[in-house]
Image (tube, rainbow, N blue to C red):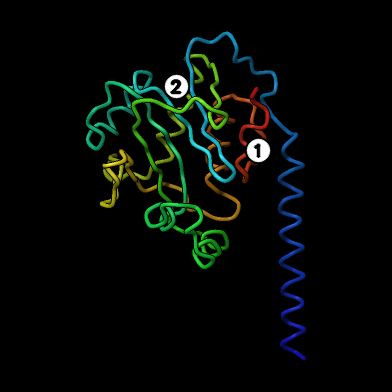
Amino acid sequence: MTILKFLKTTLITSLTLTIFYFIISHILLFFTPNTNSSTQNSRYEVSIFHDRAHTEIIIKTKDLIPTLKTKLKPFIKNLSGGYLAFSYGDQYFMLHTKRWKDLGFKTALKALLINTPAVIKVGHYNAIKKDSSIIKIHISKSVLEKLQTYILNSFKRKDDALIALNISDKERYLYYFQAKKSYNLFYTCNTYTGNILRKSGLPVSLWTPLAYQVVYHFPK
């Protein structure tokens, strides 16, 4: 009876916290500190990839600021064209789980409930898709520079150099680096993307643990 009572209490507590988590994230969805930011008449462009679970910030390589380009150059040799897609995630998941359907329950639970090591994934592409998963945003030069500075500052460094992981997927032009912040329930891949966009002056909610919340306030 004691075990059943414990399990019942644990289940109720878990469900209550889960509901509270989603309620708070949806309440904060309507608080955007940069709602008056105009992006329509700016000459630079970034794109946001989003699906049901994940988001990435995509920047043209020709628009990279010198400091970010210099840090990436030792690892990504050809930065003369194409796009770089920046995203964040739990290290074990990013390196060992190629598809969302392969995500194990134990890995997901561990990533969410405790602080786990995180990585920044950088994808180098010649072109990007033109479908509903990509949202293009027009921004000013100052916003572009801010955005890239925040991205650069999210990398963990050693002797001022980025820390590349030995496991990379160069056949698909994916590169992995140690991230400064740990991954957890309150700082997800989408929180990472949302924070960078919002701090750069774009209209993003105060907290974005879910993918659709990152792009909610941008024209589709």
Determine the CA span between mark 2 and mark 1. 24 Å
Residue at figure coordinates x 75%, y 85% from the top left: 4
Q: Quadrant of residue 6?
A: bottom right
206 relative position to 143: left or right: right
Relative depth, front residue between 196 and 98? 98
Task: Determine crowd level at label 1: few under 14, some 14-19, many 20+ residues with C-alpha closer than 10 A.
Answer: many
Amino acid type, label 1: Gln
Residue at image location 59% in from the left, 30% down from the top = 198
Q: Secondary structure at mark 2?
A: helix
Task: Determine the residue positioned at 67% across, 32% down.
Answer: 216
Q: Position of residue 183 (x, y in %)?
A: 50, 53
Work out which residue is located at the far bottom of the displayed protein and give it.
1
Identify which amino acid the numbered label 2 is placed on.
Glu
**Residue 40: which disc?**
none
Dot in front, 2 or 1? 1
Q: In this rendering, would 145 be left or right of 164?
A: right
Q: Is residue 86 left or right of residue 192?
A: left
> Residue 202's spot in the image, x, y percent?
60, 25
Q: On the rendered image, what quadrant is the C terminus found in?
A: top right
Tag 1 residue: 213
Image side of residue 94 versus residue 115, left or right: left
Between 186 and 108, the one lying in front of the other is: 108
Residue closer to the observer: 211 or 161: 211
Q: Are marks 2 and 1 in contact (CB under 8 Å)?
A: no
Q: Is residue 144 placed above or below 159 in the rendered structure?
A: above
Mark linked to residue 145? 2
Marks 2 and 1, the one that precedes in the sequence: 2
Image coordinates for residue 91, horizontal then vertical, percent = 41, 54
